[in-house]
Image: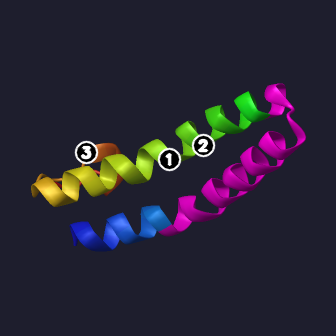
């Protein structure tokens, strides 16, 4: 069940991560550092929940209650 939740979390956050990466690539090409910094912040914010869920699943630990809907 943990892996199902991890796959759902990764699927939900895939689009915002791809949008942040596209924005970052565009900002680097245009040498627009303000938008590049904003894109990096978005990338970190959208990338942490999937990374945390994958980390818990690989370690064999249960997901936190806030992620698993209260079931342990």
CB atoms at circles 3 and 2 under 8 Å apart?
Answer: no
Neighbourhood count class around disc 3 (C-alpha, 10 Å): few under 14, some 14–19, many 20 upward: some
**Which residue in the protein does label 2 denote?**
43
Residue 20 position within the rendered picture, expressed as x and y whole percent measured from the top left? 69, 49
Q: Is residue 55 above or below residue 6?
A: above
Comparing marks 3 and 1, which lies closer to the viewer?
Answer: 1
**Which residue in the protein does label 1 denote?**
47
The residue at the point 82 percent across, 33 percent down is: 35
The residue at the point 66 percent across, 60 percent down is: 18
Magenta segment main secondary structure: helix
**Which residue in the protein does label 3 denote?**
64
Q: CA distance from mark 3 to mark 1?
A: 17 Å
Q: Is residue 29 above or below residue 4?
A: above
Report whether 69 appears left or right of 9: left
Q: CA distance from mark 2 to mark 1?
A: 6 Å
Residue 40 position within the rendered picture, expressed as x and y whole percent measured from the top left? 64, 36
Secondary element at image label 1: helix
Report whether 11 appears left or right of 24: left
Secondary element at image label 2: helix
Secondary element at image label 3: loop
Image quarter where the C terminus lies is: bottom left
Q: Is residue 8 above or below residue 49?
A: below
The residue at the point 44 percent across, 42 percent down is: 48
Q: Residue furthest left?
A: 60
């Amino acid at each position: 069940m943990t892996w199902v939740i991890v796959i759902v979390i990764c699927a939900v956050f895939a689009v915002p991560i791809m949008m942040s990466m596209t924005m970052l690539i565009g900002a680097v090409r245009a040498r627009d550092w303000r938008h590049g910094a904003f894109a990096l912040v978005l990338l970190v914010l959208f990338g942490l929940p999937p990374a945390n869920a994958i980390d818990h699943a690989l370690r064999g630990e249960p997901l936190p209650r806030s992620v698993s809907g209260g079931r342990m």
